[in-house]
Image (cartoon, rainbow, N blue to C red):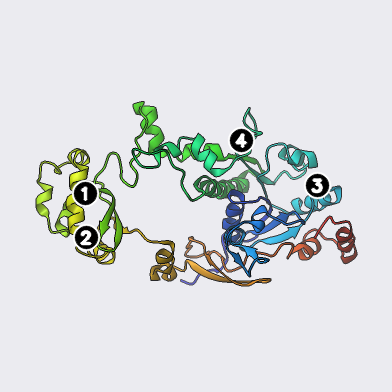
Amino acid sequence: MSQSGRPPLTGVRIVDFTRVIAGPLCTQMLSDMGAEVIKIENPDGGDDTRKGAGPRVGGETGESHFFMTYNRGKKSVALDFTKPDGQKIVHRLLGKADVMIQNFRPGVLKKYGLDWDSVKDKYPKLIYLSISAYGQSGPLSDRPGYDPVLQAESGMMSVNGEADGEGLRHAIAIVDTMTAIHSAAAINAALYARTSTGKGQHIDLALYDTALASLGNMGSYYLIGGDQPRRAGNGHFASAPNSSFETSNGKIYMAVANQKLFADTCKAMGHPEWLTDPRFATIAARVANKPELTRLMEEVLKTDTKENWTQKFRHLPAGPIRTMKEALDEPEVKRRGMLKTYRHTRVGDVPLIGSNYHFSDTPVDDTRPPPSLGEHTESVLKDIAGLGVEEIAALREKKVVG
């Protein structure tokens, strides 16, 4: 059966006031799914991440790798909504939009008449998503939120790190990333609900709540048992062998979480006697004797490479610990279609990781590049906001748009 070719959110229009990671990643996912995302950016520099440190495409005056990561497929409109003329344009866009997303601190948009309470009656079908650090109300709502601080405050950091060391943050902005995923899910759910209710609604998503929800069984470990889960570095406090192991040319990770997998591991390593050894016969025994089991396993594993062991263990949950180069140069990454090259209008070719969604009938469209600042200002103001050439020129003169 041939694909229809129509991405699942085709026809949905989103006015996007988000910056940095959580909001932009959400709207990038929705853009891949076919939504038209109109990214409102400050004419003076745009999204903060456009000025981010690190590699830039096209040299020092080029585009930040950070911005490129989270903004493909969007239409950039350089618009100063702090000015009354800018607010009028926003309202023209909201009148033709399905969704508005913003991640300003609670109360900021109220000054400009663009908070939920100010727009809900004007646009009764609008779905309005607010992303904040601690929610839209309450004593913490005015605090700024940055991913590692949320990892610290939620307890997430306390369970990450070596057993005898301090709690460590995850190097990836994991709270922002998970908030983005929850945001995309919430918007899709609200769009679906609107098909039967005919009404829009407000969605309040807090980074803090996301971090707490992501504690999973670690949170329940404390709530039900009353104890702090113990840090175990690359290992696991209640499972073995479940850790990183040395081979002749680097480390592999093995997650042997049950008795059958341990039996298969012993057989694959040529030591079936470990299965009946009293020190290793049960999960509890293996945890109690983890150092000795690790020593015996590494004696064997060091006789061959991580690549060869990965092949020998392909029926087991085990794989090489790769560098970023090794991971992204792996042929399977290309075979899965995860690497894309985008032709940016200003700086040329940009290599990026593409969408991980694979729909059988309504394929995503992750082929469109991230925009230059204000690249779509004129077309959006003309085609969607309904402004004429002279009106747009006058707004440029007044520095309302860029």
Identified by mark 2, the residue type is: Lys
Give the secondary structure at mark 1: helix
- Mark 1 and mark 3: span between their CA atoms? 61 Å
Identified by mark 1, the residue type is: Thr
Contact? badges 1 and 3 (CB < 8 Å): no
Give the crowd class for mark 2: few <14, some 14-19, many >=20 residues within 10 Å.
some
Residue at 51% x, 34% y is 153
Return the mark for residue 372: none
Q: Does 359 sit above or below residue 15? A: below
Which one is in front, 116 or 319? 319
Q: Name the spot of residue 58 as percent of width and height, x first.
A: 63, 70
Question: What number of labels is visible?
Answer: 4
Is residue 210 visible from the viewing direction of this image?
no
**Residue to which mark 1 is pinned:** 294
Return the mark for residue 82: 3
Give the secondary structure at mark 3: loop
Which one is in front, 107 or 57? 57
Return the mark for residue 302: 2
Disc number lying in front (4 or 1): 1
- Mark 3 and mark 2: span between their CA atoms? 63 Å
| The quarter of the displayed image where residue 157 is located | top left
Going by the image, does 54 lie left or right of 200?
left
Identified by mark 4, the residue type is: Gly
Which badge, 4 or 3, is on the more N-terminal residue?
3
Which badge, 1 or 3, is on the more N-terminal residue?
3
| The quarter of the displayed image where residue 103 is located | top right
Q: Name the spot of residue 67 as percent of width and height, x first.
A: 62, 59
Residue at 68% x, 71% y is 346
Q: Name the spot of residue 28 as percent of width and height, x first.
A: 59, 57
Identified by mark 3, the residue type is: Thr
Is residue 74 visible from the viewing direction of this image?
yes
